[in-house]
Each structure stands twice: as structure tokens, then as C-alpha cells.
Image (spheres, rainbow, N blue to C red):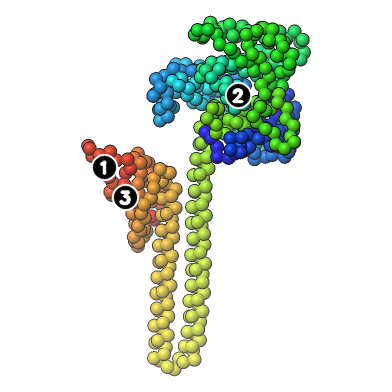
Amino acid sequence: MIFRQKKFIGLDIDEGFQTATELIKKGNQLIITRFKSAANLEDLVNGQILKKGDGVFINIPTQVVLFRSFHLPGVLARSKNKQRDIVAFLTRQNLPFKLDECFWDIFIWGSNLNFIAAKKEMAEKYISQVEGLGLRCLGVVPSLTALYNVLIYNYPEREKDNFSILNIKNTASDLLIYETKRLWIYPLSIGRKDLREDPAAQMRFSQEVQRIYNAHYMQHPLEGQKPLHYFYISGQGCSEETVSAFKKVFTDFEIALLNPLKKIKPQDNLVADSESIALSTGLAISGLSFKTTLKINLIKERIVKQRGIYRIDFTKRASLFLLNLAIFIFLVMDVILFIDLNRQETIHQETASHISSLLPQVKILKSEKERLLNLESYFKGRLKQQGLYLKALAKIAECKTPSIEIKEFVAEGKDAGLVVFVSGVAPNYEDVNNFLANLKKNNDIKEPKVVASTFPTSDTQIKAIDFKLRLEIL
């Protein structure tokens, strides 16, 4: 999901250390406009960079993320219309939980369908943290895919190489291994807290990463000669000492700290800490449109559903407002008419008292009075018909589904109600039947039925259904 806005805030949530970074996109250039780090999330929501109502992208640690890669025929992997059915089929036998129990997203590399998921209760824990402070969660992104976006944006040439990203967090870390359009994610047990408290932890850390590499290459051996492998270290806990410790173990790797500011520029005289903002910068990039970055958002479907519900609710509120406004206008017109009728009647009565001796004039006045009374009755009937007409419009708008387009609305008056003919277009018969079922549930609508519709023939495929309904409004 790509959002239309060109400014995003990435919020790196880590135990004891939170960082928020705001990015804006000018052409193909990313610019850091603001950033701030704090020990508590509450300290960031103070108006300087975050305020209530802001939308943010947050990270979710690798320890609670499930990653699977499935090899499929190229045409099948890129079939967007069937992707959800394909994912449901593949994960039915490969997930320890049901697909409906998790937030998930996919990305396609060649013929590989890559699936990333997290249990809903784990993701909701992080979402509730930011929403509890009045922020809006626009996306949930795994930490390592966010760092992948930072690296590929700053080092686009690495897309054709082999590389790894080590992300050091407070109590744990995670490792990404990339080999030319193939991706693996591994959690680690050592974090920056261990590195600070134990001087020997640097070497143990590098040895643990070495064991993961050994196990990884036993399962996924490289074909041919082993190419140069780039190794990037990121996170608040990384330092030159960490780089030195890894260089002693990984002598064949080119090891360096991940620099998110190689191509991303801070605004004006803003001084940004590259160690602190790498992950939050990657989270903000995840909402922007770049060909080489991964558009991963585990709550993509949740955002789409929320927007759909908002649109439906707005339509209902607008229809109700217009209906109330029309009724108010007709009531005002009715009051004005009655005042005018009373005034005319008073004038005629006063005139009649002065010329009561003139019988012909009296008869004329009586005839005029009867005419006005008939006019009053006529306007009352018209107001009633107009009220039923507006009521019919409101009921049709309430009962129809968004996929149905109303083409014509014809009403005929009756003594006890209003007969309405509705013509429209629907994508299929199921939508027409749902529309009809919703109308039948309404107590103010009598005998709704289909009086005309198109039907498919053996040699014609109809992509839309023309229909006509008849109903009575009481």
C-alpha cells in the first residue's frame, strides 16, 4: 500500500530507547526534517515531533515475526487476483496458526512468494502503545525489512550483491541475510544491554552470528565460488568496537556500520545521529514509493477496511443531514403558508362584516374561502408526497451496496403511500439480491421486487447487470 502523502514519521519502539524521524520526499530525494530520541514513548508526544493525531509507521521485532518463502511458477506468483487464495493454501500447512489470527503481507521476487506474518495479539500490543497516546498507526513493519529499505536506498548497488544486516536492540538482536533476491531472517539472543554489562559479550556475539551463518549455509549452500559478502551493523548498541570484534571472526566479509545518511540529507543545519535513526528512517521509507524498496505493511488490510468503513459512515451521515435539511425547509414553507392563509381569512372576515348586506359579495368571499381551503389541502398532500419521496431516497441509499449504481428513480403517488421504480446497474446478481434483501428487512418498505433485469446468454458475457425494482414506501 502506497500512501498519497509525501511526508511520513517512522517510530522505532525499543525497550528504554525510542526514536521518531520525520521524512519528506522531494522528487527522488529524501530529507530528514525532524528527529528525536527519548527513553519513554510519552516523552516524544510533546508537539516537537509527535502530536496527537499524527500517523506513524512502527516496527515489530523479528522475535515475533514469522517469515516463509515459497517457490511458485512465475505467472502464478504474480497473479494479484489470486494472491490471497494462494497464500491461504500455502500457509494452511506451513503456519503454526490460522491466517485469520495474524497480520500479514507478501512481496514477490521473481518466482518466490515471500510471506511475513505476526500474531495479532503480539502486533496489537505495539499498536495499542502508540494509539493509547493519541497517535494513528499507519503501518507495522518488521525491523529488518525497514533496515533493508534504508540500505537499498543508500546503497542501490547492493541489490545485486550478497549482504547481511545486524540490528542490535536492547535485550535481543536480529540478523538479515540477503543473496540476490533471496532473503532470510534470524533472531539473536544478545542485545546492547549485554554488550554494555559484559566486556566479553562482543566476542560471544560475533561467535553466535558465526554459528547462524554455519547453519544457514548448510541448509542453503552457495553455488560456485563464494562471492564477497557485505556486512552492515545497525542499532543504538553498535560501535567501532563491535565492528572490530566481528572483523576478527568474519575475515572474508567487508564489515561497516550502516550509514542511513549517505543519500538521505538532514534539513538545513539539523544534526542527525546515524546510529539512532537508521531503523526509524527505514520505517518512514516503507510508506513511500520507490522501485527498489519493500512495501511491507502487516496491517495493510486493516487500514483498507478502516477507510471503507469511514466512507460508508460519511455517506450515511451526509444523507441524513440532507434529509433533515429538506424536512426543515418544507416545515418552514408549511408554517409560512398557514400564516398566509390565516391572514387572508382574517381579511376576508373583516371585509365580509362591512359588506354583509351585499349578498353577492358574501357569496364571492365564501367561494374564495373554499378555494383557499382546497389549496391548503392540496399543499398538505404535496408535502406528504415530498416527505415520502425523500424518505424513499434515504432508504434506497441506506440499503444499497457500494458496488450498485442507481441510474433512475421514478415515483408515483398513491392514497396511502408512494410507489417507487428504481433502475440501476450492478456487477453481478448477488449484489442485486443483497440490495433486494436489505430492502425487505426495512419495515417502511412494502413488497420490493425485481420487475426487469438483464440475463447472460450462451455467447455473451455480461460484465454488469441492469435491473429495475418496484417498491412501496409507507
Q: Name the residue tied to disc 1.
A: 455
Identify the amino acid type marked 1. Phe
Per the model, the C-alpha gap separating discs 3 and 1 is 13 Å
Residue 76: give x, y in percent of width and height: 39, 23
Under tag 3, what secondary structure? Answer: strand
Q: Nearer the viewer, residue 430 or 149?
A: 149
**Closest to the observer: 63 or 246?**
246
In the rendered view, tell whether residue 376 sits above or below residue 23.
below
Residue sitting farthest toward the bottom: 357
Q: Is residue 83 left or right of residue 298?
A: left
- Give the residue type at disc 2: Tyr
At 42% from the left and 88% from the top, the residue drawn is 362
Residue 150 x %, y %: 61, 26
Could you say which is closer to the camera, residue 466 or residue 58?
58
Quarter of the image where one finds residue 426 = top left
Q: For the view shown, which residue lies furthest in the left direction?
A: 458
Determine crowd level at label 1: few under 14, some 14-19, many 20+ residues with C-alpha closer than 10 A. Answer: few
Q: Which residue is mark 2?
A: 155
- Which is more foreground, mark 3 or mark 1? 1
Q: Is residue 178 above or below residue 302?
A: above
Asked whether the residues under the numbered discs 1 and 2 touch, taking CB atoms below 8 Å apart as contact, a structural biologist would say no
Residue 157 x %, y %: 57, 22
At numbered mark 1, what does the secondary structure look like: helix, strand or loop?
loop
Image quarter where the C terminus lies is: bottom left
Q: Residue at x 49, y 68 (%)?
A: 333
Mark drawn on residue 468: 3
165 is higher (above) or lower (below) than 412: above
